[in-house]
Each structure stands twice: as C-alpha cells, then as structure tokens.
Amino acid sequence: MISIQDRIVLITGASSGIGEACAKIFARGGAKLILAARRLERLDRLAKKLAETGAIASANDIYLIELDVRDRSQVEAAVNLLPDNWKAIDILINNAGLSRGLDKLHEGSFSDWEEMIDTNVKGLLYVTRYIVPGMVDRGCGHIINIGSIAGRAAYPKGNVYCASKAAVRAISEGLKQDLLGTPVRVTEIEPGLVETEFSNVRFHGDAEKAKNVYQGLTPLTAEDVADVVYFCATRSPHVNISEVLLVPTDQATATLVYRKSP
Ligand code: NDP
Ligand code: 8X3
C-alpha cells in the first residue's frame, strides 16, 4: 500500500454522490484535493465540512474549481490557471457524469443524448487530455475513470447512456495501452446500482421514479465505490488494477436484480 499523504488528487463531479465520497476518503488519507463541479456552492459546503471535521488539515489543502467539463475552453483554462503548487496532479478521478432519460432510442430526446455524450465522453476526454501530459512528463500519475456496469452490455432504454459508458471503457483500455512504458496507471471502475442523485437526475427531478430504482434491494452507497477507488489508488506502484466491476449483492447484471416484495 502506498501513502496518499500530500498527493494532489483532482476529482470531477465532487459536488455529490461518488465524487463527494471520494473527496472525503482521500481527505482522510491526507491528500490535497482539487474539487471540480458546476455547483460551486456545494463544493464550498463540502470544503467547509472537511475542514470542520478535521479531515483536511487546513484550507490550503483544498482547491475548488467551478467547472463544466463539457466546455473544452473552460477545462483548458482551469488546468492552465492552476497555481504552481497545485499543478502536479498525481491522481485524476474522472467521475463527472450523468444519465438523462430512460427512453426507447427511436423516441429519445436529442438534448438528453447530447448532454450525456458531451459530459460522459467528451468531458472525460477533455479533462484527461489536459492533465495526462503533465503526468507523463513527471513520470508519475494515475487516472481513475468511473465507468458503469452499463458500459458492459446495453439494457432496454439505456441505449445512449450505455453507449457513453462503453466509450469510457474503450477510452480507459486505449489510454492504458498508450501509456504503456510510462509509470502512469489507468483504472476503470464499473459500479452497478449506487443510490445517489443519479436517478433523480436521470428522471429530471422525479423523486418517486428515482426512489423506485432502488426499491426492494440494498444498493451500493457512494462510500462503497469510493472505498474501491481508494484501494486502487493505494496499491504499490507496480500494480495496475485495470478494471473493477462492483455491484450490490442483490444485482447480477444491469437487468438481473433481486428485489424483495414489499
Ligand atoms: P450524482 O448525480 O450524485 O453526481 C454526479 C456528479 O457529476 C455531480 O457532482 C455533478 O456536479 C457532476 N457533473 C454532472 N455534469 C457535470 C458537468 N457537465 N461538469 C462537471 N460536473 C458535472 O451521481 P453519481 O455520484 O452516482 O455519479 C457519478 C458517476 O458515477 C457518473 O459518471 C455516473 O455515470 C457513474 N455511475 C453511477 C452509478 C449509480 O448507480 N449512481 C452507477 C455506475 C456509474 P454538478 O451538477 O455540480 O456539476
Ligand atoms: C448507472 C448504473 O444500471 O443505472 O451507471 O445504468 S445503471
């Protein structure tokens, strides 16, 4: 196991769910955190909580960025404008992502498709493209992409979300191949059902529909996923965990789920 003390960790989508849980566990490990998301007020709140609970030693150990990963020029500026003492990012957690809608492909919404592809695929690519060259130059780094069980096989009405996560899987595999011969590591984590704001976002704020997704089973928590992210990041430098499929005990595949009747 390697220490995370004073490592610089950039987490996209840190304002909620898995990203927020990653911020907490890496803070407890002594990391310096760069937290990015569109909702800066949420990041502010999280930073205050981490300071109050003593998870981070001082406000100097955390740097917040209001960032929409879909906007390439914003991503470029955010990386280029990092203060010198924050530039040497050791671990990049590409977590920002979302699903929008659950519709048959031929009835799908163009704006939902664009939002998913722009965030989950293009956003992840932009952030990776601007950060990985520094890792290669410094001879040190780890990219951890949050994919999904949805990237392994499509499920009915999942079409474009599943495609976006299949892309994350292919991009992670390709990046690992392209970084071969460097010490930079690449991991893709593929969670199954995790109860976060994910389904609320998917159903455009319909809380009832969102709740039903987890009805009758014990889903993963954001902390369960963050635990695995942390485990992968703290292996010895010669160990690269390339892929982890992580599901609730009540889930076998994206569509095969055991639910207790009410
Ligand atoms: P949440 O909705 O709780 O969190 C999503 C995060 O992504 C938020 O912090 C949000 O921040 C951020 N985000 C969304 N769009 C953008 C954007 N354009 N720019 C920057 N940040 C953005 O969901 P989860 O924590 O569950 O999702 C995290 C990741 O895990 C996603 O990639 C998701 O696909 C994946 N995943 C989730 C599973 C689940 O069942 N929950 C299972 C498998 C994978 P903000 O809105 O402030 O920008
Ligand atoms: C989120 C898990 O099964 O809702 O990626 O697509 S699922």
Image: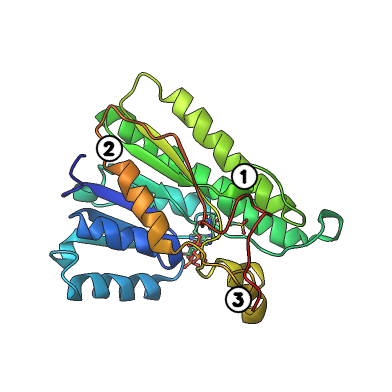
Residue drawn at (25%, 75%) of the image = 48
Residue 146 percent coordinates (x, y): 48, 49
Any part of residue 151 in sight: yes
Q: CA distance from mark 1 to mark 2?
A: 25 Å
From the image, tell me which residue sits under label 1: 151
Which residue is more in the foreground, 72 or 252? Answer: 252
Can you tell which quarter of the image residue 17 is in?
A: bottom left
Q: Earlier in the sequence, mark 1 or mark 2?
A: 1
Q: Residues within 10 Å of mark 2 (few under 14, many from 20)?
A: some
Could you tell me the amino acid type at mark 2? Arg
From the image, tell me which residue sits under label 2: 235
Which residue is more in the foreground, 102 or 84? Answer: 102
Residue drawn at (23%, 59%) of the image = 27
Q: Is mark 1 within 8 Å of ligand 2?
A: yes
Label 1 element class: helix
From the image, tell me which residue sits under label 3: 211
The quadrant in which the N terminus is found is: top left
Label 2 element class: loop
Residue 153 percent coordinates (x, y): 68, 43
Residue 121 percent coordinates (x, y): 58, 46
Could you tell me the amino acid type at mark 3? Lys
